Amino acid sequence: MAASTDLFARRNRVRIVVVVLVAALNYVLAVALAAVTATLVLIIAAMFNFDIFPSDADSLAWFAYGIGGICAVAFVIGFLTALVRIPTARRKLEERVLNETIARIVRDDSHREVRNLLDGLAIAAGIATPRFAMISDPSPNSFGVGTRPKNAIIAITNGLVDHLSRDELEAVLAYEVTRIKSYDVALASWTVALTGGAIDSGSGLFSWLPYRIALALQVWALRDQGTERDRAAVRFTRNPQSLVHALEKLDNDQTQVASVSRATAPLWIEFPAKALSGDSSRATRVLRRSLLLDERIAALRELAHMPPAGATT
């Protein structure tokens, strides 16, 4: 189990590096495109207003040099802005997700059962006990967030506590704890933090390319994570039946988490369908399909040597 988890963690750390580099370049591209476009609009407007047009090859060459200089300046501005934005986006992610979901960090003695379960799971996994937050929402679901394991937060809805038995709740919490240990939460958090801006801005005329790159980066980083997460949780708890039963309850429940965005949807144990409203991109469909619960449940049943749901023995 340890060797498999370590391999998963190493792969996730490599992906984090790639995500940071590509997302930084994507942000540079977005800033450069915006700067070049705005400058070209001003230049063209000035040319028509003052009737100034290149009249010969030399003036045309100087015009081209000017455009090239503008692109170079825009690239430098984009690069410097990206250097500032990346740590800022990382620091603000937890606050953004907690505010988006109206989650409340539990600092008192309430929800003692959840705290006791997390303490035991964290000790068994060899990590610091993560903070946890409660979301006042009847839909059973949970997510993990945090770009560093020692600062991770596990958030669960009231619906998760109300719908699951103690063993099933422990299995879901074990799922989230193994995600922290394997750097899966860190990978998902970095990916969301650095692609969320481009995805939230949509695919407008000037943001189309950065938007598509951000979607593709999310898919590349997270497309096969669902199954790997489940397998790691099963190896950790050695109680696959409880995890299967918990995921089946989530899959059968028809309610949707009220507050969620497309950018942060990959953080959740069950990809919220509500977040897909208005987004029919191929990248989103691929990512959602890779995180669908029904296929993951079938794989877990096979791993646990459990008969398919509804089968008679």
Image: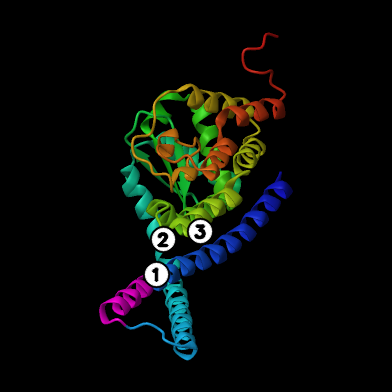
The image shows residue 121 at horizontal and vertical percentages of 55, 42
Q: Amino acid at mark 2?
A: Phe
Distance from the alpha carbon under mark 2 to that under mark 3:
33 Å
Label 3 or label 1, whichever lies nearer to me, is: 1
Q: Is residue 48 magenta?
A: yes
Q: Which residue: 44% across, 61% down? A: 90
Tell me residue 198's x, y (percent): 43, 57
**Pointer 3 residue:** 148
In this view of the protein, which residue sits in the foreground, 215 or 312?
215
Residue 37, disc: 1
Query: Do the numbered discs 2 and 3 sit on residues whose CB atoms are within 8 Å?
Result: no
Residue 259: horizontal and vertical position, in percent?
34, 39
Say which quadrant the C terminus sits in.
top right
Vertically, is 57 above or below 77? Answer: below
Mark 2 vs 3, N-terminal side:
3
Element under disc 1: helix
* Amino acid tagged 3: Arg
Question: Which dot, 2 or 3, sits closer to the camera?
Answer: 2
Q: Residue furthest front?
A: 55
Please state the extent of the stretch shown in magenta in the rendering.
Answer: 37-51
Return the residue at label 2.
206
What residue is drawn where x is 64% and y is 60%?
A: 14
In the image shown, does 222 or 247 lie closer to the viewer? 222
Q: Is residue 238 above or below residue 182?
A: above
Q: Residue at x 62, y 58 (%)?
A: 15
Q: What's the magenta bit mostly, secondary-structure-wise?
A: helix
Disc nearer the start of the sequence (3/1): 1
Contact check, label 1 and label 2, Cβ < 8 Å: yes
- Asked if residue 149 can be seen in this view, the reply is no
